[in-house]
Amino acid sequence: MLPKHCTKNFTVSFPVEIGFVNIIIRDDKYFDIALRRYPMYTVMSHSCPHILIEKLQWYFKGEKVVWSLDETHERSLTDFQKKMFLALSDYAPYGTVITYGQLAGYLHSSPRGVATALKYNNLPIVLPCHRVVAKNGIGGFSAGLQWKRYLLQLEGVNI
């Protein structure tokens, strides 16, 4: 039997160098990921035998990880965010960045629309909003610029 926190629906936090990755899994899919300086849920005391948690742990160990929309809960991303996910997979894979304007061009949207959709992204890392930057700098990030810089450096991008 799986540990209680490793069932189809669970919440868990695990530490990384600059804080905690706080995760909600619903129906065996990513429902919410919050990057904070503190744990929001029970901190894992051992490895959780759940592939979605393991993928995030691999990512934070510096491994290149690829996610799919099938791993996201149907209510976690808007239709526009799902289009962004696909565009970022094609135009800003692991270790690269794209500007808000470039992404907006691929999506036939505006840079402001892209920025707003990213601001309300419930699945940072999986929907890699940290890879979207301003044309003249790093841009914003809902978890804070320290997290954005950390994630980009983890992927080998120096901004």
Image (tube, rainbow, N blue to C red):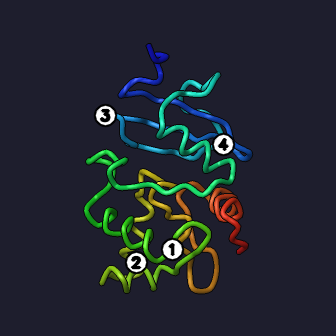
The residue that appears at 39% across and 55% down in the rendered structure is 68
Q: Nearer the viewer, mark 2 or mark 1?
A: 1
Residue type of the residue flagged with mark 4: Arg
How far separated are the C-alphas under marks 4 and 1? 27 Å
Could you tell which of marks 1 and 3 lies nearer the N-terminus? 3
In the picture of the structure, the residue carrying the numbered disc 1 is 92
Residue type of the residue flagged with mark 1: Ala
Q: Secondary structure at mark 4?
A: loop
Q: Secondary structure at mark 3?
A: loop
Instruction: Examine the rendered structure and indicate whether residue 83 appears above or below residue 64.
Output: below
Residue type of the residue flagged with mark 3: Asp
Instruction: Examine the rendered structure and indicate whether residue 99 appears above or below residue 29.
Output: below
Q: From the viewer's perspective, is 88 left or right of 54?
A: left
The image's mark for residue 27 is: 3
Residue 5 % position (x, y) = 47, 22
How far separated are the C-alphas under marks 2 and 1? 18 Å
Residue 110 % position (x, y) = 36, 82
In the picture of the structure, the residue carrying the numbered disc 2 is 112
How far separated are the C-alphas under marks 1 and 3? 28 Å
